[in-house]
Amino acid sequence: MVPRYARPQMTAIWEPEARFKIWFEIEAHATDALAELGVVPKSAAKALWDWWTTNPTIDVAAIDAIEAVTKHDVIAFLTWVANNVGDEARFMHQGMTSSDVLDTCLNVQLTRAADILLADLDALLEAIKRRAFEHKLTPTIGRSHGIHAEPVTFGLKMAEAYAEFSRCKVRLQAARADVATCAISGAVGTFANIDPKVEAHVAEKLGLTVEPVSTQVIPRDRHAMFFATLGVIASSIERLAVEVRHLQRTEVLEAEEYFSPGQKGSSAMPHKRNPVLTENLTGLARVVRAAVTPALENVALWHERDISHSSVERFFGPDATITLDFALARLTGVIDKLLVYPDRMAKNMNRMGGLIHSQRVLLALTQAGCSREDSYVLVQRNAMKVWESDGALSLLDLLKGDADVTAHLSSAQLEALFDLDYHLKHVDTIFMRVFGATS
């Protein structure tokens, strides 16, 4: 985790003290259940909670010092708790194994991280929606292969992003539900030394569901899906960031990141206004996606368990969630303050002499009795003259002067084919599909 790209609320989930607090809750809730079943004295569970109520402070340094000797983090934690609680602590961890604590804790952390990310997505969606309706009918050129194609609106660009991040939200909700499981099943997951009722009790207390078959670890296909979902969200962030970066290029300049008073774009060139935030988002997306392949590789563990997944998750559990949280917040800020230039959009759209209307002419010729093949040739031979003139010539004028074209279409008919509003007639339909009955 790099502090430059981290926000406190998400970072707090992954702090050692937070992790140890979750461990204690798992152990204490399990001891409660064991006491109710008569396996351990009720006084043992009470002793744990009494100590926690009066002194809910984790001494991370002390636990680390014990681990330096034991070379085992869970044993170090249990030893530290026993040193503080006293004799009753011997009833902790009855029938449990380390993975019960570690895996259940990780899933608590991932669900809490997911809740923050879902809130981030809601904020982003709100910003995108506002800009979409603001520019619902702001005409701009649609591009394929980076080349002028046909008119769209800037609002449609935003609507597309809204639909995409709405899908991201649904996926993350599903991934959160999938990873929100609890395992308190003991060595190799058979419940030989602990009643399944203990697992059910801990799961309920921590807002999880029981893992149907946990072997000795919670199956890592759940985690693979979770981090794959984060990777997809990161890619959606990058897609929108790249769109902004392209629109900010000097030759385009249809939109750009907000440039605050006093901001500097270059140490050498005072005129520069660079898309630094969206370039940063492209880089951060790569970091999040870097967790996906290791998460997939963690699925294949030996037999009932090994710990080849453990070291990997200690890295990318915090890194992927913290980075994605920061990236979503940054993208929200970019969209919220994005500078949009409708006049420049109109200028760019009109700079190629009307080539953007070529398909309408092609279709009109076919409907007037000309074969599609001949229609294509007639339009293309005039369009290429406009292209080669860099927009200095007018496609409409050339078509009006082409006897083969006017044999099928009158000047008035040709002029009608160059109507910009024609391309925007279904914007309302698309918005209804994306946003529903929202004005």
Image (tube, rainbow, N blue to C red):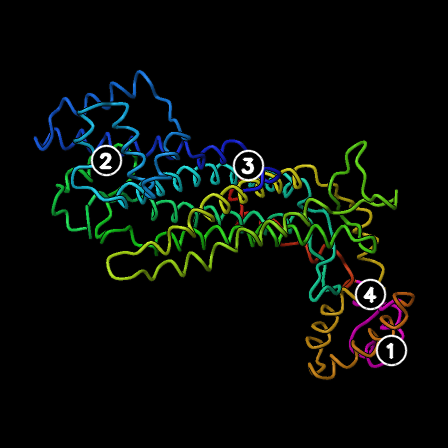
Q: Which residue is mark 2?
A: 202
Q: Is residue 125 left or right of residue 296?
A: right
Q: Amino acid at mark 1?
A: Asp
* First reached walking from the N terminus: tag 4 or tag 3: 3
Q: Amino acid at mark 2?
A: Val
Label 2, residues with CA under 10 Å away: few <14, some 14-19, many ≥20: many
Q: Quadrant of the N terminus?
A: top right
> Quick check: can you spot residue 10?
yes
Magenta extent: 394-415
The answer to whether 131 is drawn above or below residue 140 in the figure is above
Label 3, residues with CA under 10 Å away: few <14, some 14-19, many ≥20: some
Residues under numbered marks 4 and 1 in contact, where contact means CB atoms less than 8 Å apart:
no
Q: Which residue is mark 4?
A: 412
Q: Nearer the viewer, mark 4 or mark 3?
A: 3
Q: Residue at x 89, y 68 (%)?
A: 397
> Quick check: can you spot residue 429?
no
Q: Secondary structure at mark 1?
A: loop
Q: Which residue is mark 3?
A: 123
Q: Any magenta on residue 426? A: no
